[in-house]
Amino acid sequence: MARLYLALLDVLTSLTSEKIVLDKNLKISYNMCSISMKGSHMREIVPPTECPSCEAPLEWSNDLLYCRNSECFSQSSKKIEHFAKTLKIKGLGPASIQKLELSDFADIYTLTKMMIAEALDSEKVAEKLFFEIRNSTNASLNLLLPALGIPLVGKTASAKLSSVCKSIHDVNYESCKEAGLGPKVTQSVINWVENEYPFCELPHSFEFDQPVEQPSVQGVVCISGRLKSFKTKAEATEALNERGYLVKSSVTMDVTHLVNESGIESAKTQKARDSGIIVVTHLKDLIGELHGIA
Ligand SMILES: [Zn+2]
């Protein structure tokens, strides 16, 4: 009985966005269907046979009832809700999804500003939502893939794939293995790529974010005292950064070069010498070019 009770609860919560109230007598109610577990007396639960949302016949699977109707509004609206949330489309919540009569992801991108204004009865809201929707077309596959509601494919799987693939076209058994995806996730994502992607009408590029290539660091520089080759330390820092040097204001462990053009034996210079850091007396020796000498 408990199993059936939980199954029924699950069906109701998964198929509707309405709240189910469980009172202190352990009575749950949902529309026409209600059960009571008062005291030791239990009334038999009659599970629904039709989807409360689309009225399609429900199917049992592992003690749970499922609506298999692909056109079911409750299902599609939940999927769109997840899509909008993942792509951070502000203003596209359950109420708007219903009013805009969206039934799949691609519908979102066929909306015009006028259609939104009409459905939501506000030009101001339409203006904002239209912008949010346009903006979401820039989302990379890193964000888009978890938004599509592909079973088992979330942000983690997507991030892993992005480390070995440039676009959706690179997603195959080999690249999934290289990315470290398990067999179930791999099968799920490949199924989507083979069976659903060809019919996908989303305007996105379907390309992953590419990791930003870090320029190799030539060394870490600390400047001591006044400079002769540059007017300011800021200018010198910029020139050094351009050539792949990092600039630190004190002699830290990672400093490789100390620049001392003034010739004054400062505490920094002393410390650098003691630590075996290369002391450079002309910055041009380091960056190989003269800059801004007055
Ligand atoms: Zn349904």
Image: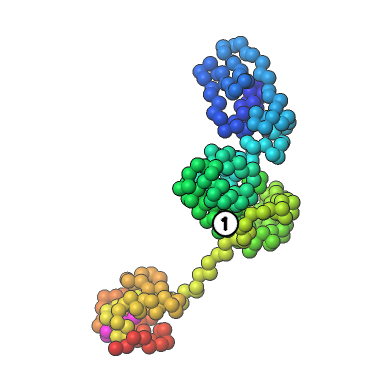
Q: Residue at x 69, y 59 (%)?
A: 171
Q: Quadrant of the C terminus?
A: bottom left
Displayed quadrant of residue 164: bottom right
Q: Quadrant of ligand 1?
A: top right
Q: How is the image coloured?
A: rainbow
Q: Quadrant of the N terminus?
A: top right
Q: Is residue 88 above or below residue 68?
A: below
Crowding near pointer 1: few (<14 within 10 Å), some, many (20+)? some
Q: Is residue 65 above or below residue 44?
A: below
Q: Residue at x 64, y 50 (%)?
A: 106
Residue 213 in the image, given as x and y percentages of width and height: 53, 69
Determine if residue 85 is in view.
Answer: no
Residue 202 in the image, given as x and y percentages of width and height: 64, 54
Q: Give the magenta part as a residue range.
A: 259-263
Query: Which of 120 and 66 lies nearest the eye of the viewer?
Result: 120
Magenta part, dominant SS:
loop
Q: Is residue 41 above or below residue 212?
A: above
Displayed quadrant of residue 77: top right
Identify residue type, mark 1. Thr
Residue to which mark 1 is pinned: 137
Residue 150 in the image, given as x and y percentages of width and height: 66, 47
- Relative placement, left or right, of 69 versus 36 is right
Q: Is residue 127 above or below residue 289?
A: above
Query: Which of 133 and 118 lies nearest the eye of the viewer?
Result: 118
Q: Residue at x 41, y 73 (%)?
A: 246
Question: Is 36 within the magenta?
Answer: no
